[in-house]
Image (cartoon, rainbow, N blue to C red):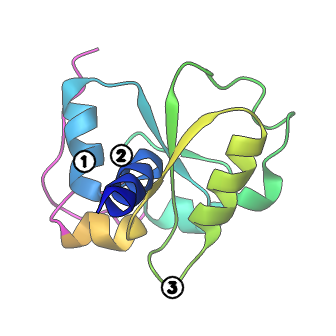
Amino acid sequence: MKEQIEFYKRKLAFEMDPSDLFEAFEKGDDYVALDARQSFGFEREHIPGAINIPHKNMTEESTRNLDRSKTYVCYCDGIGCNASTKGALKMTELGFKVKELIGGIEWWKFDGLATEGEYPNQGKSFECAC
């Protein structure tokens, strides 16, 4: 049982679900949603306040101006896409604190949360107190 407990603790250290991220945003925690998809996907629809760095473009140069004190939560379309995993790996290799969003933007919307972009989804939204 000890081994199983450690497995779940480690798993939770590296991923979060949409409600966890939403709650972190509401509390003002130092999390940044990072959309690892290509820019056309981001432009269509993204998590409010997210930044977009396609995993294929993640380099020292493209991440130079990011705040290394924050935790970057990589996401993509959903369970049928692994751009978030590729992005999380690259960001970790570049020395950032990273988590992966379980279910991507599809599960964000499934949980009734709002999106921004050309085709925004209405839903519950958070307000930044900063």
Where is residue 116? Give x, y as percent.
36, 54
Q: Could you say which disc has been placed on residue 80 in the image?
A: 3
Q: Are marks 3 and 1 in contact (CB under 8 Å)?
A: no
Secondary element at tag 3: loop
Q: Is residue 19 something that shows in the picture? A: yes
Q: Which region of the structure is painted magenta? A: 111-130
Upstream in sequence: badge 3 or badge 2 = 2
What residue lies at 48% left-to-right and 66% top-to-bottom?
A: 44
User: In this rendering, would 49 be left or right of 121?
Assistant: right
User: In this rendering, would 122 be left or right of 130?
Assistant: left
What residue lies at 44% left-to-right and 75% top-to-bottom?
A: 78
Q: Badge 2, how many Cα within 10 Å: few under 14, some, many 20+?
A: some
Q: Amino acid at mark 3?
A: Gly
Q: How far apart in space, not on screen, are marks 3 and 1 (Cα)?
A: 21 Å
Q: Badge 3, how many Cα within 10 Å: few under 14, some, many 20+?
A: few
Instruction: Indicate whether residue 114 is drawn in magenta.
Output: yes
Secondary element at tag 2: loop
Between disc 3 and disc 2, the foreground one is 3
Q: Amino acid at mark 1?
A: Asp
Where is residue 82? Give x, y as percent.
60, 74
Where is residue 25? Give x, y as percent.
27, 34
Which secondary structure dominates the residues rendered in magenta?
A: loop
What residue lies at 72% left-to-right and 23% top-to-bottom?
A: 65
Upstream in sequence: badge 1 or badge 2 = 1
What residue lies at 35% left-to-right and 46% top-to-bottom?
A: 48
Q: Which residue is mark 2?
A: 48
Quadrant location, the N terminus: bottom left
Q: Could you say which disc has been placed on residue 20 in the image?
A: 1
Q: How far apart in space, not on screen, are marks 3 and 2 (Cα)?
A: 22 Å
